[in-house]
Amino acid sequence: MALKAILAGLGGRGFHWFEQCRKHAGTEVVAAVEPNAERRALAIKQFGLKESQLFNSLEEAIKGAKADFVLDVTPPAVHRKVAEAAFKAGLHVLGEKPLSDNMTDARAVVKAGEKAGLKHMITQNYRFSAPPRTTRKLIEHNAIGAIGQCDVRFYRPWADHPGSHYVTEPYMFINDMMVHHFDMMRYVLGLNPLNVVAHTWNHSWGWHKGDAAHAIVFEFEGGVHGTHTAVGCEVGEQTNWNGDWFISGSKGSITWTLDAIRRQYLHKANPQVREEVTPLAVPDVSQAILDEFAAAIAEDREPECSSADNVHSLAMALAAIRSAKEGRKVRIDEM
Ligand SMILES: NC(=O)c1ccc[n+]([C@@H]2O[C@H](COP(=O)([O-])OP(=O)(O)OC[C@H]3O[C@@H](n4cnc5c(N)ncnc54)[C@H](O)[C@@H]3O)[C@@H](O)[C@H]2O)c1
């Protein structure tokens, strides 16, 4: 039987998740919560939802609809309130990234979910795409030996809708967008970070109030280094959303250029390797997330991207922001 969802937040991303649940055999949206009347009206028009399925608050929706989980697609500052209300009512939570906009709230919700014995998964969708899935397998199979360094470059005109919180609030580029890349770095390398140094700035032609360009260096476990360079107001050539990657190992490199994956081993290699890697066939990333969440509930196990794990990805973003603000190296365990 399909898991019944209360969808909280009918912004652009909430509409995406409504469609995704409709496509997924194992999930069904039975109610939605949205304080904005215009968005509620649009949801009725676009999805054929009934007035009786729409609520002003999560508490009212929980009283008015029988559900198994809350799909939280509200802004980051609201995520703690939504998760705590859901857990109190005995509902699992599938929550949009970032887990929170601060570590205190993030840790509190991880604890609340564990105490309630309920599943709490964060929709870190980028890591479900073919390049990270394929590269992690290659690294696990020692395809380029010991990993030393991972460099990620991202250039795009990110979040160019005037007036949105992505544009008006500080450091959104790192907390909202780069948390995907930092999570992918953890996933691909299979390592957690130890410390970070970040420099951030803005360009004269940029449209974000907060800094939307940076150079960041992470040190991971085992002496592995990761760099992240980005321009979020790029008006010229663009990378893909995953960014371009260069992973250096003792037996060669794995690179992604516009998502094309290559493995090379050239210097003093016998035989030399210059290989286009066929990416693994993976399902649509949002469907894969719903599959994983439903499976974790059915099998009563921790989902991939559980909030307890995701707190490490959030800490990377928030530690980078602290480093930029305070002009110093920040240990991840300070966060
Ligand atoms: N994974 C991805 O690739 C991806 C892409 C876009 C957005 N997101 C994430 O999705 C979330 C929402 O993003 P968005 O772009 O749709 O934002 P948005 O601001 O367009 O929409 C958020 C909606 O939540 C509503 N809301 C506010 N408080 C609420 C509450 N207490 N209960 C219910 N609804 C409430 C708002 O009225 C608004 O309609 C953010 O966390 C964002 O980072 C993720």
Image (cartoon, rainbow, N blue to C red):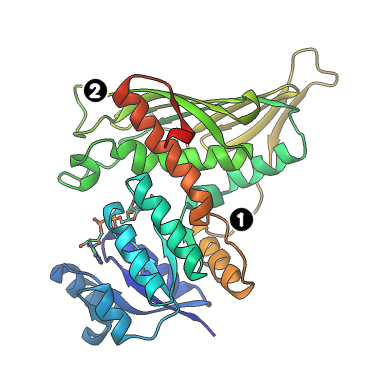
Q: Position of residue 264 (x, y in %)?
A: 71, 25
Q: Closest to the observer: 118 or 287?
A: 118
Q: Please tell me which residue is depicted at 30% across the width and 36% down the height of the picture.
A: 157
Q: Amino acid at mark 2?
A: His
C-beta proximity under 8 Å, tags 1 and 2: no
Task: Tell which circle, 1 or 2, labels the residue nearer the N-terminal end.
Answer: 2
Ligand 1 sits in quadrant: bottom left
Q: Closest to the observer: 319 or 21?
A: 319
183 with respect to 189 (left or right): left
- Mark 1: few/some/many CA within 10 Å (<14, 14-19, 20+): few
Secondary-structure class at tag 2: loop
272 with respect to 246 (left or right): right
Mark 1 or mark 2: which is in front? 2
Looking at mark 2, is its residue's CB closer than 8 Å to ligand 1? no
Looking at mark 1, is its residue's CB closer than 8 Å to ligand 1? no
Q: Please tell me which residue is depicted at 33% across the width and 25% down the height of the picture.
A: 324
Q: Position of residue 23 (x, y in %)?
A: 47, 73
Q: Name the residue beneath numbered marker 2.
A: 203
User: Can you tell which mark lies on residue 282?
Assistant: 1
User: From the viewer's perspective, is residue 159 above or below residue 289?
Assistant: above
Q: Position of residue 108 (x, y in %)?
A: 39, 55
Q: Closest to the observer: 28 or 262?
A: 28
Task: Give the tally of numbered discs.
Answer: 2
Q: Quadrant of the C terminus?
A: top left
Q: CA distance from mark 1 to mark 2?
A: 37 Å
Q: Position of residue 37 (x, y in %)?
A: 14, 71
User: Can you tell which mark lies on residue 174?
Assistant: none
Q: Please tell me which residue is depicted at 27% across the width and 66% down the height of the picture.
A: 10
User: From the viewer's perspective, is residue 98 above or below residue 73?
Assistant: above
Secondary-structure class at tag 1: loop
